[in-house]
Image (cartoon, coloured by chain):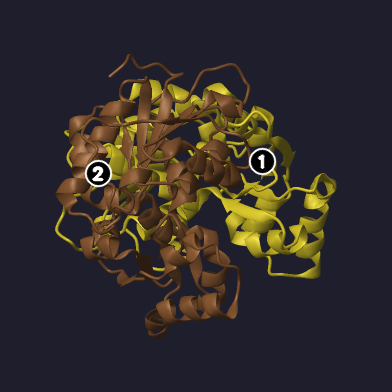
Chain colours: A yellow, B brown
């Protein structure tokens, strides 16, 4: 890895564009820190892939990012966090954060009755990673996990707040209604984009947790406690100080990134040597 | 310091009983961790004392707590955090958290317009510690700090929600109303006890930040990232596993602690060698 300094970047990786919700929060909560974002768009989604494949892809991306000077890494993808976080932590000496522990911890803080729901992709729910992270800290919690496979396509379709969209959200969340939850973790980076709809369906007594916001918050904590906050002069950075990489088509990545982040971005396409097939699984 | 293990305790120190709001959150958010609490009741309040005195008192308490096996320390007092945190961090190798950085970071996460207010004792406001912590991370924030000396006596008087109490809160917060704040940090451990009154006065568009909740949350993050979470069997602890020390009268400390925490506590009186006078000046 390149020499580390306080001006080194925060690496953020995701299977595609979903992790841009985390990147946006890092840029907002740590406006003086530089980011390097890698979206593995051409191998997205990771959800249906085997754990071994996801670990391999994640390791490849971290090796690529290590060619730059990087002082911390965020795995901004729930699936990759669930299966690859520990292995990446063992391989690299910089602080490595996933999105699951911050979401779990924020839910514990928010929950008053200790009744916590988790929604995510089938891969994330099957891994039980949120369940483990929550129970590790508080074994007395009631935790209900539920896969909502129809929500990511709904977000990606860019559907408006139509009757059809409402009926999908209602149907996906229905099984959670009987548990009297007080807190719900949106365990997929796409969900914050429809958090209003989820909130309306769950009702005002349920606190929604966005892993994106919470991960940026924990990154700030970890950087400060490791003495790694930038010591740059007291200026926020400019959009072009950051760097975005995609394994897919730069134009479509740029279009989505600029729309989500609200400013122009510098995007480069990267062909990783061992990139495997483009099937979307 | 005694040998450290994953079953070692979390030390929490305060000038008196105010830090029990932090202790309560640590017990709630980390129910498997053991705490050692020191309330320096006989030298309370720290607010009007000189920084050198506060640093000396804080160091004495940490030395006392070090006689136990302690894996992390929380300075649960805004005044002591403002003037003694750095010095304690330099003297002890375990992670040391104050209440100011977590409150600042939570405010940055919560704030949408970047207009953040801070209320605290005169000592805390004069130290500008919140201002520095906020600006270090985001120099573009608008930060308005305001001392509210009448609020701690109001809390301590145990006054109900009377017209008189309302008028005090209204008067103390009035100078903040013109700044169109979107977030307000309650920079004193007493304030969360009257957060309903503060919220009513500031209006629903202002998000209140409780340093107590946020500090417990950051403690959980730091313990996990340092590999220091307990590896005890999957059980929550019992009230008597924790230990409370006071430099004042144990009976009155016990009464307040049991009332705030909602369970019985084990309290011991401690006479520190160099304890100085009891004046509350």
Residue B16 in the image: state x and y as whole percent: 39, 46
Letter of the chain that mark 1 sits on in the rendering: A
Secondary structure of the residue carrying tag 2 is helix
In this rendering, position of residue A88 left or right of residue A4: right
Name the residue rendered at 46%, 50% in the picture.
Answer: B212
A278 and A255: which is toward the camera: A255
Q: Name the residue tied to disc 1.
A: A121
Is residue A67 among the parts visible in the rendering?
A: no
Q: Quadrant of the N terminus of chain A?
A: top left
Name the residue rendered at 41%, 77% in the picture.
Answer: B172
Q: Name the residue tied to disc 2.
A: B85
Q: Nearer the viewer, mark 2 or mark 1?
A: 2
Residue A141 in the image: state x and y as whole percent: 68, 35
Q: Are marks 2 and 1 on the same chain?
A: no
In the displayed orientation, state which residue is furthest to the top: B3
Residue A95 in the image: state x and y as whole percent: 34, 33
A269 and B158: which is toward the camera: B158
Numbered mark located on residue A274 in the image: none
Name the residue rendered at 38%, 50% in the picture.
Answer: B102
């Amino acid at each position: 890895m390149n020499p580390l300094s306080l001006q080194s970047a925060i690496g953020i990786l995701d299977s595609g564009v979903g992790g841009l919700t985390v990147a946006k929060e890092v840029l907002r909560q740590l406006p003086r820190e530089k980011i390097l974002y890698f979206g593995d768009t051409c191998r997205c989604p990771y959800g249906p892939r085997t754990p071994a494949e996801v670990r391999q892809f994640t390791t490849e991306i971290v090796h690529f990012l290590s060619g730059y000077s990087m002082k911390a890494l965020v795995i901004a993808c729930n699936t990759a966090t669930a299966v690859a976080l520990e292995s990446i932590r063992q391989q690299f000496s910089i602080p490595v954060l996933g999105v699951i522990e911050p979401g779990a911890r924020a839910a514990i803080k928010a929950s008053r009755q200790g009744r916590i729901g988790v929604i995510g992709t089938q891969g994330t729910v099957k891994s039980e990673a949120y369940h483990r992270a929550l129970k590790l800290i508080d074994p007395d919690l009631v935790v209900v996990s539920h896969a909502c496979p129809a929500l990511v396509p709904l977000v990606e379709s860019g559907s408006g707040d139509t009757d059809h969209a409402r009926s999908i959200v209602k149907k996906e969340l229905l099984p959670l209604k009987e548990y009297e939850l007080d807190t719900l973790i949106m365990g997929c980076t796409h969900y914050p984009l429809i958090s209003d709809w989820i909130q309306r369906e769950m009702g005002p007594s349920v606190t929604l947790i966005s892993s994106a916001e919470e991960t940026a918050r924990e990154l700030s904590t970890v950087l400060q406690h490791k003495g790694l906050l930038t010591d740059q002069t007291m200026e926020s950075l400019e959009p072009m100080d950051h760097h975005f990489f995609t394994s897919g088509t730069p134009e479509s990545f740029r279009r989505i990134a600029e729309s989500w982040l609200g400013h122009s971005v510098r995007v480069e396409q990267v062909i990783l040597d061992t990139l495997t097939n483009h099937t979307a699984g």
